[in-house]
């Protein structure tokens, strides 16, 4: 059987699949490892990346080669229909060159009908990078209000909470840190004692805003407040870039798709190639990120 693991490592689905070593008739075949997003409405696994096929590892291969294998290898197996030997369909997500024409196609006017599923932003990946676990500046996400219901974080995609929230790691010494190790704030012993905060684990916080310090010129958090223990489903804190992005999004200061297109055009003129692939992401990456074999990195 094939196993689909959540981001936390627990099992989302165990099922028969036409993928290598995915059903009882293929038990002697070498396995495959895919990075996917599950869409429950259509019961489809959308394939973002391929890291291993038939026991052959390509983690260290360039992005454009891995994406070539996604299309070529998936075309070799009957995974486009559902039957007793293949419970879920698998399909590659649309991919486009990160130039003006490619971005226009990927964006599709911000319409869900452009790709036959509801989008959740665009994922930019450097063509020559290896497969990265965790955060990487070579794998970035961009969103706006047209391409994502959750452009600004909310529980239902409609009601924006009065304050920005985030999940951070509290060190034993009281320092509050993001995924990158950025120190966002510090909990005093008095706050720890009063709120009975358990250190060395994840906790929720609210943020007033992220601003630029006049003294240092770097981004700093204003109004960091403790909001309670973190969700047991979370295994990692939020990234600093996500916190900054959300603060900018709440104030309408994120770059537009036109600004990104101009930057890609300039990069293409300088280097002859924007060296980036834009992927239209399925909205359910947020709702069912537990279907992913790893996080592709929100806002970095």
Image: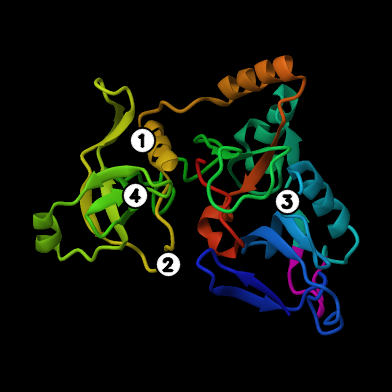
Residue that numbered label 3 is attached to: 60
**Is 273 drawn above or below residue 4 in the view shown?**
above
* Residue 204 painted magenta: no
Q: What residue span does the magenta drawing correspond to?
A: 81-89
Q: How far apart are marks 1 and 2 (CA)?
A: 24 Å
Q: In the figure, is residue 186 to the left or right of 161?
A: left
When asked about the image quadrant of residue 51, the answer is bottom right
**Residue 192 - label:** none
Asked if the residue under mark 4 is in contact with the one under mark 3, i.e. CB atoms within 8 Å, the reply is: no
Circle 2 SS class: loop
Q: Distance between the residues labelled 4 and 2?
A: 14 Å
Residue that numbered label 2 is attached to: 233
Q: Distance between the residues labelled 3 and 1?
A: 34 Å
Residue that numbered label 4 is attached to: 166
Circle 4 SS class: strand
Residue that numbered label 1 is attached to: 247
Q: Which of marks 4 and 2 is nearer the N terminus?
A: 4
């Amino acid at each position: 059987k094939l196993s689909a693991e959540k981001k936390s490592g627990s099992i989302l689905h165990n099922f028969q699949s036409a993928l290598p070593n995915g059903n009882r008739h293929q038990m002697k075949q070498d396995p495959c490892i895919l990075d996917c997003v599950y869409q429950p409405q259509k019961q489809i696994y959308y394939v973002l990346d391929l890291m291993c096929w038939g026991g052959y590892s390509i983690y260290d291969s360039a992005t454009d080669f891995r994406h070539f294998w996604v299309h070529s290898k998936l075309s070799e197996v009957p995974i486009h229909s559902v039957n007793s030997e293949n419970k879920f369909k698998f399909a590659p997500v649309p991919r486009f060159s990160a130039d003006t024409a490619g971005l226009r196609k990927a964006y599709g006017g911000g319409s869900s009908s452009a790709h036959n599923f509801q989008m959740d932003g665009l994922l930019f990946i450097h063509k020559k990078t290896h497969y990265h676990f965790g955060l990487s500046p070579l794998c970035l996400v961009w969103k706006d209000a047209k391409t994502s219901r959750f452009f600004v974080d909310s529980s239902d995609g409609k009601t924006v909470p009065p304050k920005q929230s985030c999940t951070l790691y509290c060190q034993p010494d009281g320092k509050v840190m993001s995924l990158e190790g950025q120190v966002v704030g510090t909990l005093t012993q008095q706050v720890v004692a009063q709120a009975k905060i358990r250190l060395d684990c994840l906790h929720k916080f609210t943020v007033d805003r992220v601003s630029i310090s006049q003294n240092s010129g770097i981004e700093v958090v204003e109004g960091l407040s403790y909001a309670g223990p973190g969700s047991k489903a979370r295994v990692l804190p939020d990234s600093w870039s996500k916190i900054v992005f959300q603060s900018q999004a709440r104030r309408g200061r994120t770059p537009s798709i036109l600004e990104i297109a101009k930057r890609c055009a300039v990069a293409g003129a300088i280097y002859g190639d924007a060296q980036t692939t834009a992927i239209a992401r399925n909205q359910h990456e947020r709702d069912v990120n537990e279907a992913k074999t790893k996080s592709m990195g929100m806002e970095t």
